[in-house]
Amino acid sequence: MVTAPNLMSQNITELQDLFAASSADESVLMQIEDELRYRQAPRALALLVEVQRALRGRRRLGGAAAGPSRLVPVQRGEPFSAQARNRRGNEA
């Protein structure tokens, strides 16, 4: 496992390089993601999207235990409020 340097002091080019070098290391990707959440520059936001895609891809492939899905199927024609009531009734 690679330990990421203090990411707060890294510029976006250094974070991009770290992402490229550590794309297989989920712990480093999570550290990069955490740092990028504090940044608002367009390049940082674009890198955040890439990092999140990489993390989702790893989880889909079994790279980490993904939690149960919280998605609820939407039935056509049923108003959202009725769906919410039905879902609450099913959770009880």
Image: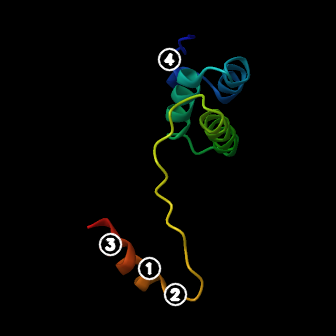
Q: CA distance from mark 1 to mark 3?
A: 9 Å
Between 82 and 89, the one lying in front of the other is: 89
Within the image, what quadrant is residue 82 found in? bottom left
Within the image, what quadrant is residue 23 found in? top right
- Residue 1's x, y, as percent? 56, 10
- What residue sits 67% from the left and 35% below the top? 54
| Disc with the residue nearer the chain's start (4 vs 2) | 4
Could you classify mark 4 by the number of other residues whose Cα lies within 10 Å: few (under 14), some (14-19), or many (20 or more)? Answer: few
Residue under circle 4? 6
Point out the frontmost of discs 3 and 4: 3
Q: Mark 1 belongs to which amino acid?
A: Gln
Residue under circle 2? 78
Between 39 and 81, the one lying in front of the other is: 81
Residue under circle 1? 83
Could you classify mark 1 by the number of other residues whose Cα lies within 10 Å: few (under 14), some (14-19), or many (20 or more)? Answer: some
- What residue sits 55% from the left and 40% below the top? 39
Point out the frontmost of discs 4 and 2: 2
Cβ atoms under marks 1 and 3 closer than 8 Å = no
Cβ atoms under marks 2 and 1 closer than 8 Å = yes
- Residue 6's x, y, as percent? 50, 17
The residue tagged with tag 1: helix, strand or loop?
A: helix
| Disc with the residue nearer the chain's start (1 vs 3) | 1
Q: Mark 2 belongs to which amino acid?
A: Glu
Q: Mark 4 belongs to which amino acid?
A: Asn
Residue 88's mark? Answer: 3
Cβ atoms under marks 3 and 4 closer than 8 Å = no
